[in-house]
Amino acid sequence: MADSAVTWTLSGFGDEIDPDPAIQIAVLKALGAQHIEVRSAWGTNVVDLDDAQLATFAALLKEAGMGVSAVASPIGKVDVALDPDLEVQRLTRIIRVAHALGTDSIRVFSFFRGEGVSVESTRDAVMTRLRLLATEAERENVTLLHENEKDIYGDTPERVLDLVESVGSPALRLAWDSANFVQVGVQNPHDDGYAMLRPYLDYLQVKDAVAATGGVVPAGEGDGQVLKTITALKDDGYTGFASLEPHLDEAHALGGFSGPEAFGQAARAFAGLLAEAGVSTR
């Protein structure tokens, strides 16, 4: 109902639209967003942007009056067997990027494992590495947002809860991705995971997926119970970011891609769900 409406802040993965950040910003603004989630620009992953590129990007954002909801880093999207200091060093660089772009939120992951390696056997190594990353984040006053990506330690609600509670850092919080839960066999992401993870949930990634095929679809068109999660977040008083990550076109080296037209399709589908739930965006 209108009198119970709340407002969330709309954002989106700019590089799902186009490699050029000027086009990313223009399309997001046309869709009503005043924020962007930064994963890559000019075909370069955010961790590899040099200082000149960062300065150019920051200037584009300032000129457009655009904020940055989070830096979508690749931290933790590596084999857990690698030297843990390597990810700490990469995080140090990412923190510089975040500061330059005016955000204190950085998306991270909880490590891949080698073929034939059981997820249970990696637990201690994962926790050690996330604790090191969280310590660095605490020192630099940034927040790490763990995303439940496929094939990492934290890919199911139970293991996501395990890692966030075991690390126990105020600098490690959660980003919720319904589609990724569906793709790892969580049949009802909201029913199976929302209540246990809600105390740690600070960020919403918006995409959906079909359980039978694993295919990614606009929000509300798959099995991710997206409307149910939106409604619950609204009822819980959530007023944070909702970041569009449609993944509606072919994947490429830097992550999912949609293109401007499909990105717009995803934005309109999400807007429909928000209207149904009584949530507005800014």
Image: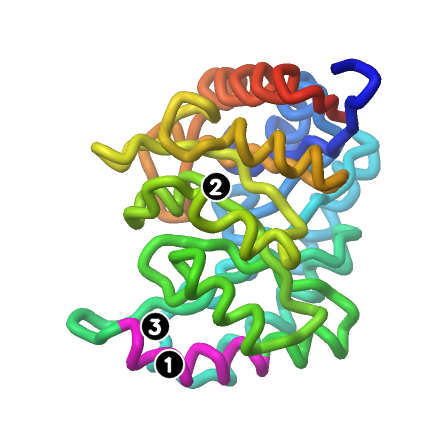
Residue drawn at (39%, 57%) of the image: 156
Residue depicted at x 30% and y 76%: 120
Instruction: Give the residue at x 42% y 32%.
Output: 208
Q: Nearer the viewer, residue 56 or 134?
A: 134
Q: Quadrant of residue 169?
A: bottom right
Mostly what secondary structure, the magenta segment?
A: helix
From the top left corner, tell me how far across and down residue 233 is, in percent: 65, 38
Task: Point out residue 5 in the picture as x, y percentages from the top left corner.
Answer: 78, 22
Identify the residue under disc 3.
79
Query: In this view of the protein, which residue sits in the foreground, 59 or 29?
Result: 29
Q: Can residue 175 be seen from the camera position used here?
A: yes
Q: Is residue 130 magenta?
A: yes
Residue at the (72%, 44%) spot, across then down: 68
> Would you call the spot at circle 3 few (<14 residues within 10 Å), some (14-19), or many (20 or more)?
some
The magenta-colored residue range is: 119-132
> Alpha-carbon distance for marks 3 and 1?
6 Å
First-in-chain label (2 vs 1): 1
Residue type, numbered disc 1: Leu
Mark 3 and mark 2: Cα distance apart in space:
29 Å
In the rendered image, which quarter contains the C terminus?
top right
Left or right of 57? Residue 42 is left
Q: Are the two marked residues, 3 and 1, in contact with CB atoms closer than 8 angstroms?
A: yes
Q: CA distance from mark 2 to mark 1?
A: 33 Å
Neighbor class of circle 2 (other Cα within 10 Å; few <14, some 14-19, many 20+) is: many
Q: Decide: is 93 above or below 39.
A: below
For label 2, the residue is 190
